[in-house]
Image (tube, rainbow, N blue to C red):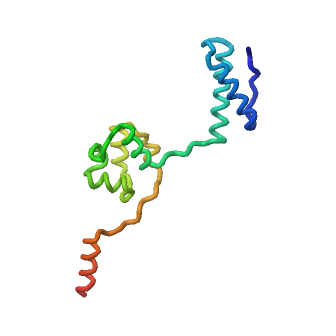
Amino acid sequence: MMTTIRPIRNEEDYETALEEIEELWVAEPGTQEADCLDVLVMLVEAYEAEHYPISTPDPIELILHVMEARGLTRRDLEPYLGSRARASEVLNRRRPLSLEMIRKLQTGLGLPADVLIQPYALQPYSASVGEQVRALAGANDD
């Protein structure tokens, strides 16, 4: 069986290509069917990249996902992010990742720097109760 390879221009072409890929999946390497499978897979990947793009993950979501997948704790991140408090600030989006943290995460955990450097939202700073009391006491000294 030799499939005629055509560009994928719409959803119908896409679905047809997926069905043909499924039929060719068991093709022996080096055969015309295997070559056809390779070309169809490339066409499908190009169509999906254009019509179903996968956005770059949020840096903190990536770190949290890796922690869960590898069974890591916040303590395990201390060598990469600094103290336990610093790790907490980063993971709670109170402090941005520094260039040094990104380098350590890339080298130590193999995380992609191109994802870690992406901008992400930080939580607005909220002073602790103690800081608020001290600030108010200082304002009353005037």
Where residue 37 sits, quadrant-wise, is: top right
Q: Residue at x 73, y 29 (%)?
A: 16
Q: Residue at x 75, y 35 (%)?
A: 12
Q: Is residue 10 left or right of residue 76?
A: right
Percent position of residue 48, x then y: 64, 37
Percent position of residue 115, x then y: 46, 45
Decide which of 52, 99 is in the foreground and name it.
52
Where residue 53 sits, quadrant-wise, is: top right
Q: Residue at x 64, y 16 (%)?
A: 34
Q: Where, quadrant-wise, is the N terminus in this rendering?
A: top right
Q: Is residue 37 left or right of residue 132?
A: right
Percent position of residue 63, x then y: 39, 45
Decide which of 57, 16 is in the foreground and name it.
16
Q: Is residue 126 left or right of residue 35?
A: left
| 61 over 121 or under it: above or below | above
Q: Where, quadrant-wise, is the C terminus in this rendering?
A: bottom left
Where residue 17 sits, quadrant-wise, is: top right
Percent position of residue 55, x then y: 55, 45
